[in-house]
Amino acid sequence: MSFEQSTIINLIITGVGGQGNILISRLIGQAFIEEGRTVTIGETYGATQRGGSVASHVRISKENMPYSPVTPRGKADIIVGLEPTESLRMLTSYGSPDTYVVTNTRPIHSLEVAIGEADYPSPEVLRDCTNRLSRKAWYINASEHALNLGNALLTNIVMIGALFGTGLLPLERSQIEEQLKKSFKGEKLSVNLRAFELGYGAVEAST
Amino acid sequence: MGIESDEPGSVQLLMGNEAIARGALEAGVGVASAYPGTPSSEVIATLAKVANSRGLYVEWSVNEKVALEVAAAASLSGVRAITGMKQNGLDVALDFLANLALTGVNQGLVLMVGDDPGGLSSTNEQDSRHVARALDLPLLEPATFQEAKDMAKWAFEVSEAIGNVCMLRSVTRISHARGNVVLGELPSTKKQAHFDTSRSYAGIGGMADKLHRAVHEKIARIISLYESSPFNFYLGPQEPELLVAACGSGWLYAMEAVRTLAQQKSVGVLKLGTTWPLPPVFLGAHLKNAKKILVVEEVDSFLESNLKEFVVDHMAGRDYIFFGKASGHIKPYGELNVDVAIQAITTIMGTEYESRDKSYEEKSRDAADKYIPPRGSQLCPGCPHRATYWAIKNALRLQGDDGVVAGDIGCYSMGLQPSGFEQVKMVHAMGSGMGIASGLGKLERFNFRQPVLAVCGDSTFFHAVIPALINAVHSESDVVLVVLDNSGTAMTGFQPHPGTDKDAMGVSRPEIGIEKICEALGVPTMVVDPYDVPATQKAFLKVLNDKGKTRVVISRRECALIRANRQAGPIAKMRIETARCLGNDCGCDRYCTRVFKCPGLIVDKESGKVRIDEAMCSGCGVCVSVCPQSAIAAEAVQ
């Protein structure tokens, strides 16, 4: 179960503005570029970048020509979600019965939920919808792992670890760790590698 | 690594705007100037980072017109220059540009415009390309990240070939997306600036018509360069059933649509990178084999209309059927994507395409409608604008005469929305809030009795509010200007401005105080801290009742994100005294969350009471004064 033979891999990394989806999309994109692939990364966002829905569309191609920066409807291969309703939002727009989902389970309430204009779905409903609309889904409490390491902002790195734990991407674990080593130094690097490891292990534990 | 890498041939993952900056570096650019505006800001921001090591002069100018003037000064004095702006910014610069286009430039001057199809981060989605045609300026449109770099470099040569500004039109999906870019060589040229006083540049004094003729000759001269441009090419069968003409990101959409539909044998794609003026020999060679032409381009039917004109002038005796925005096959508004291009091609070709089967589509819509809560725009936790709007809302209600708030461009445009308590009633262009307010304040002869407030940010104040303020002060307009001073151009990435103490390159510069300008105008000016809610509210009520002449309130508090970026930590530790919190039974129906709407406050479903979301809360303490039960307390942080 890997996209090794695929001419194009469409990966969407989604979450709420500020969760760091752009950083991890760049790390993955850079790792694939070093593998000789053509990468296009586009961003979509809702009404605002701050606190709104955000997604990075990472399109990884074996061809020499870039793809459109936004994934066409129904063409997402893998959705990585830093927030569970955002994973489902992307799945309903870009997913198909063949789409894999790796999602954080920790909710972030929107303003509409906070002020009582909208309801946040229960974890059971979320899981049921996500399972029904995907080929396979992994549920990771990445925020908890990140908070255990002392920083909620590490959630994105835990989720990259989880993505690699699924074995979906045709990329060695060492190649993304190499990118982490280029981006972080010293204490920051070791805590990021630890976050990656926790995410990687969490997938094995959940299957 | 990085934008300065001196490894020609190496591949980097660059944002379109970084690629444009790299292209400018490879062209030996000396001066870069801009006023920030999404999606253009990163061109100059990227060059600012390497200004000192590459020996450039880079500035965040006070507005787009001055930015273009600063860049033109370099060009006229023999130094290559670039300016970048969004489509709204081009409007600001247009007055100067329309004259510069006549008098011409010396060394290469590139005007990068980042259009925003769909208005994702803009008040409009206007198409800048019309300006290039209107002013007879050469226009280039990159379709890929590699082209963004290569075209930016070439644009300097185009500019110098005819001695005029070259416009490089990008869009959000190129400027703000990333992709592979193969780097070229960085030149090591030494730059010398000198203004040749034997020449002059002016259209005044009866020269306008002669210059106008000369500019027509210039644009005609560029055609031979365009004819052999590698940015124009055709991919497809010799005699396509359908020819898709595309430019910019439209080309990516067209190519992917044809591949997705597996129509490579019947549909050809004609890519145009040099979209004004059009290259007639190149076009004629490809159009002679086509009958049906679909045009895929962002925003207006610019290429489409020009191609229609072209076939009348150059392809006499041939019949064409055009499809695109005029025919309704592509919507003439909003942003395009691959699915839009697929829809147009299948309609024309009479084929079928289903992106997802019907039952999956239904299940998706059902899940989205029933279970996914909306996630609309909001001000950040701790945003001083929320506190200011809260004080404005309360002061206007206490004043009681149906006060009107005119807004402006920035994060605080969210004053239109629930997060800013819907206090703002209009947002147009930079500085327009104060201009409109100045007019509202002069309607007393028509029994206008409503108090008038204009709000603007600190960067906007310098950009375009000062003339409107002078207008109000001089005409003794009965208005209050509220300057929401959060110490930077927050919305576009915290760029410095004349009120801050550093420039784009990190050099210390004199701060220009907003209150000093106001005092010089003789306008009563008050400074408040919006985090002190009772004092701010009292100040607003006072100025609202001080009717008569123009007044200014500066509501000053650093942007919560600038503070967070400094890793300053929370200001205070907020705590809910649960025993006092009435939760769902609060007489005002959860006043703090439902009415005040700070994302740092959330309702605990089980207890029905409010709690602090520690991951969100910035500890600004504004909610302490909001709670009618005094159930929110702030504790000092050790």
Image (tube, helix red, strand yellow):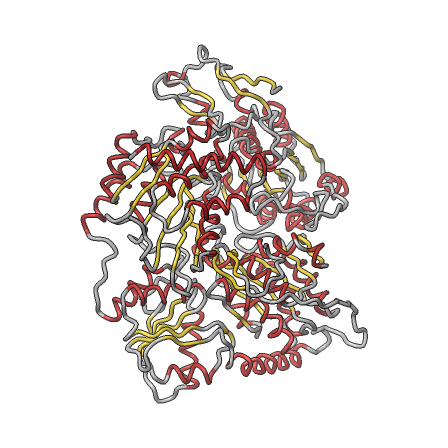
In the image, residue B561 above or below residue B254: above
Q: Does the rendering let one see residue B142?
A: yes
Q: Residue at x 64, y 29 (%)?
A: B529
Where is residue B516, by image quadrant? top right
Q: Name the quarter where the N terminus of chain B is drawn.
A: bottom right
In which image quadrant can residue A72 be found? bottom left
- The quadrant of the rendering that contains the C terminus of chain B is top right
Image x and y of residue A95, in percent: 29, 48
Q: Is residue B316 left or right of residue B280?
A: left
Quick one: which residue is furthest to the bottom in this view?
A: B317
In the rendered view, tell whether residue B305 sits above or below residue B96. below
Residue A36 percent across, percent down from the top left? 45, 60
Task: Using the image, determine if residue B143 lies above or below residue B364.
Answer: below
Furthest-right residue in this view: B197
Q: Relative to A112, is A90 above or below?
A: below
Most distant residue in the top direction? B579
Q: B134 or B336, which lies in front? A: B336
Residue B407 appears in the picture as rendered: no
Judging depth in this view, the residue of A134 and A194 nearest the camera is A194
Residue A161 image point, x, y percent: 41, 39
Give the side of residue B386 with respect to residue B470, left or right: left
Q: Nearer the viewer, residue B432 or A65?
A: A65
Residue A191, percent from left and from top:
51, 34
Picture residue at 26% right of the left edge, 42% below the top? A136
